[in-house]
Amino acid sequence: MTNSPPLPDSTDPSAASPASQNPERRREPLEGYADHADAVPLSGSLIGDDPTAMFQEMRREHGPVVPVLLDGIPVWYVIGYRELHHVTSQPQLFGRDPRRWNMRDHLPPDWPSLPYVTWQPSVMHCEGAEHQRRIGAVSDALDTADRTELALICEQIADLAIDEFSGDGQTDLISQYAYRIPAQVITRLFGLAEADLPELVEDVNYVLGGGEEAPSAITRILDKISRLIADKRTQPGHDITSHMLAHLARLSDEEIVMDLIVVIIASHDSSANWIGSALRLMLVDDHFSMSLQGGRSSVGEALNDVLWKDPPSPSLHPRWAVQDCELAGRRIRRGDMLVLGVAAANADPQVQPAAHADSGANRAHMSFGHGEYGCPFPAPELAEIIAKTAVEVLLDRLPDVYLAVKPDALRWRPSLWVRTLEALPVRFSPTVPTGQGPSNTWSASR
């Protein structure tokens, strides 16, 4: 649960940009930011298919903490592994509440990264004892999930997704597979009614897409989760929602609604991107492609490699300086925003020397975050079960699958926050459906 765009209908009036409410309050953004005189322009459109060269140049010219203009707004881009570890280890110095940002007055209403700096009343932006109370409930509830049952549910959903295109001999593994699995698995663990799953998964994808459908989609999600909580209060079961309702933290219904939605959106997005990137790696990299013909032996290795080199969330949710401080020789002012560049930090030569670039079994990456705001236990374990099972089922069902285009024709969606392919077109020998999915409701949503 490392990144999650907030709900479009945030109930807090301070969530809107003050600049959009009162343009006269805007000042010159670089006032007081001497270090940003030679700042590096940064935006999603500048993140290419391979940002490695950009990271190297930033590190060479500016060191581990880079002054950048993120779509025109001065922020700090933390790309050093040790510096990122330090920031995530010090929540008392670098907080999660965006309302302390000293640049909020400068944000235009159409600023591209606005969803990632908008406050919402969820576990994502709580701090101190309140965050520990709410994240403790989330973590304890997630830990009640039976891992064997989770793998079985994922197998069934993956089989059902494959059944939809197995007879066609071709598909897009991003839209038709990777993005159809995680939310269905997670919401089943929540105890959501089977009939509600297809629409909810579609609505989650609408929210993540950020288009015109997003506001109405989040309204429908809120309604479904609210009804789920009301049902579980009167008729609890052995599911994550019931465990959160019974938790000693005594969360209110409103708190549980917000936190369950954060879990759904963050885990679905990250897991889907992880699945898609791992499948790409196994289709284009000779080191991993052997498993397409020889079994599952390198699936776990491929998943780990993705976390090092193409993490699903290449930048973690920002932090804001609680007080004036120094980081890697940079003067950080109270209220400054720091973007945590996980993909860049994972490539830090102090951690990954060029001569030893093979990630192997090394799990010291920062892709799940670190510290109090890292992905809560046992979410990384559950996400790996989902991703690993999804990849394995596909290889079992479509053993001769191959890329339908040249590898260099694949394009990553330009984004600072999300690492996902625009499409992963493949071909394979048509096969008959297995009919082993948990239901046939999914096809009704297509």
Image (cartoon, grey):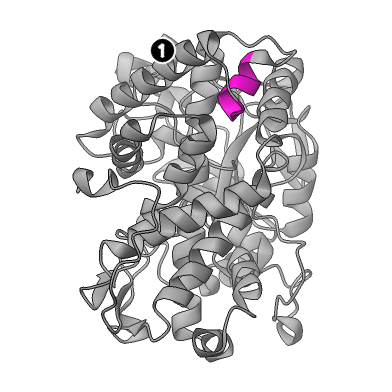
The answer to whether residue 48 shows anywhere in this view is yes
Residue name at image x 52 percent, y 27 percent: 260
Instruction: Inspect the magenta stretch and tell me whether residue 19 lies in it.
Output: no
Q: Residue 176 falls in which quadrant of the image? A: bottom left
The answer to whether residue 121 shows anywhere in this view is no
Location of residue 84 in the rendering, given as x and y in whole percent from the top left corner? 72, 50
Answer above or below: position of 179 versus 33. Answer: below
Query: Label 1: few (<14), some or many (≥20) within 10 Å?
Result: few
Residue name at image x 54 percent, y 59 percent: 387
In-image side of 294 versus 375 (left or right): left
Highlighted range, magenta: 238-245
Answer above or below: position of 11 versus 89. Answer: above
Location of residue 290 in the rendering, given as x and y in whole percent from the top left corner? 55, 90
Of the 4 image quadrants, the one containing the N terminus is top right
Instruction: Inspect the magenta stretch and tell me whether residue 239 lies in it.
Output: yes
Q: Is mark 1 on a helix, strand or loop?
A: loop
Residue that mark 1 sits on: 11
